Amino acid sequence: MYGYCAIIAGVCVSILWGGPSAIIWMVICPTLGAAISYAESSLGQVYKIKKDGEYRGGSYYYLERRLGMRNLAKFFALLTIIFVPILTVGPHANSIALAFHTTTSVPNWITGLVVGLLLLTVVFGGIKRIGKFSTIVVPIMTGIYLLLTLTVIGMNIELVPSVFGTMISSAFGANALYGALFGQAIIWGVKRSVNSSDAGMGEAVPASAAAEVAHPGATGLVYSMSVFIDVLVCFCTGLIVLMIDTFNVLAKDAVTYLHIGEDSEIMTEMAEKNVAGITWTQAAANSVIPEFGSIIIAICLLFFAFTTILSYYYQGETAIVYLLDKSSRKVRKNAILILRLAMPLIFFFFVISTSSATWAIESLGVGIMVWTNVIVLLIKPPEIIKIQKDYAAQLKAGREEPVFNPQKLGIKNADVWMEINQYKIAQSSGYNRQSL
């Protein structure tokens, strides 16, 4: 799970422009997103390579090694470096600073300095430290956030029918107040669903390719399931602000308000500025857990967004390794060092920047990368089908850990797998000969 900023802050933006029904469209969209995530993550595993002692994979690797599109692969790698570890950091940095400033009045530059130093410490540990940090933090923060949602529902259980009724009726244009936002609800719901999981963007591919597994299908399933977890947390955010009434909704003219939340005075102030974000969720949490609710949300957002930024860094590192494939190891190492040193500075810069520009930049970057990657995934899907069928067939045959053999499936340019699974493939061949 990577787009955690979209999960907490971005959901509020979608409700502002699309109304409560945007949440329903967020829930509908992930079925396609899960399929795309499986495709890109499993392909990333298949066509990964071993470079400088580490496994490396990304959309650019299967663009080149599967489709022979080296120029497009270089272009995608360049896009990755520009948009992911640099420009897409913006919304996350800005949301973290806003969350802590709203709660504790801590100046943005202090937040930027502290988190930037923490970021520097983790990225210098490489993929192993990044993976260990994320594995510990994400489940804990997700559990806390779900517990908070259940608390909100439990304390306002009588509102559940009306909230769900409003979301569902407006999702299909039947609600008298929000029905006119039908088209915008779909657009913003789908947009937020894509941004929360980043399925199709190729964001998860470098990390998924680095995983040491015996079959790409295993990684594909894990990352496809993560899409549904992202959407669950998105749904939780929507429920929290709708049930506590800390949300605003703009009409199509982008001037008139169809609804302004009445539970907190901050909603009127935000309506005057035409903005939405983490403050909505914090206001709702404060209504349930006075004084501490907003702090809990700020801490959750900090670690959610921080793990996302770590993923962004690793994508940039992998893209650098790909582009400098023909260079010496020392050149690659120095280029990675520059990125590691730059990440805290990039974060600090966006912490003191305005949010409107950063969200626009992120949407542009995500859009270009998603279209490029998804079109490629749709061109030649045979390998994806082969991977899934082979994995499922081995499980059905009773094999606890399916083993990937690209030669058996007729998949070329996946030689690293013959090295990874050489002993298991040999054992499997010996067993088959004995059974004959």
Image: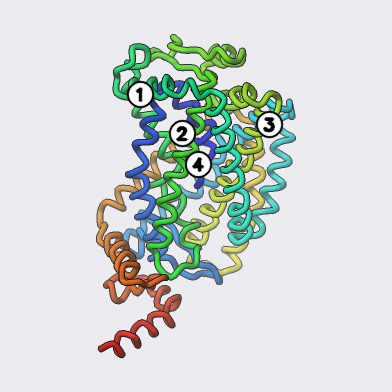
Above-or-below relation of 182 to 40: above
Gap in angstroms between the C-alphas marked 2 and 4: 14 Å
Name the residue at 51% across, 53% down.
315
Q: Earlier in the sequence, mark 2 or mark 4?
A: 4
Question: What residue sits right under mark 2 in the picture?
Answer: 235
First in sequence: mark 2 vs mark 3? 2
> Residue 3's mark?
4
Mark nearer the N terminus (1 vs 2): 1
Residue 67 appears in the rendering: no
Residue placed under numbered mark 3 in the picture:
295
**Is 314 located above or below residue 108 in the figure?**
below
Q: Secondary structure under badge 1? A: helix
- Where is residue 39 shown, x and y percent of the image? 35, 55
Q: Position of residue 393 (x, y in %)?
A: 29, 68
In the image, which is nearer the foreground, mark 1 or mark 3? 3
- Residues at discs 1 and 3 in contact (Cβ within 8 Å): no
Three-letter residue code for mark 4: Gly
Q: CA distance from mark 2 to mark 3?
A: 20 Å
Q: Choose the circle earlier in sequence order: 3 or 4.
A: 4
Q: Which residue is mark 1?
A: 184
Front: mark 1 or 2? 2
Q: Nearer the viewer, mark 3 or mark 4?
A: 3
Using the numbered discs, state the Cα–Cα distance from disc 1 to disc 2 in whole angstroms: 18 Å
Amino acid type for the residue under numbered disc 3: Ile
Marks 2/3 in contact by CB < 8 Å: the verdict is no
| Above or below 291: residue 255 | above
Work out whether mark 4 precedes mark 1 in sequence or the reverse, and give the earlier one.
Answer: 4
How far, Cα to Cα, is label 1 from label 3? 32 Å
Determine the CA span between mark 4 and mark 1: 21 Å
Secondary structure category for the residue under label 4: loop
Name the kind of residue labelled 2 in the image: Phe
Q: Residues within 10 Å of mark 1 (few under 14, many from 20)?
A: some
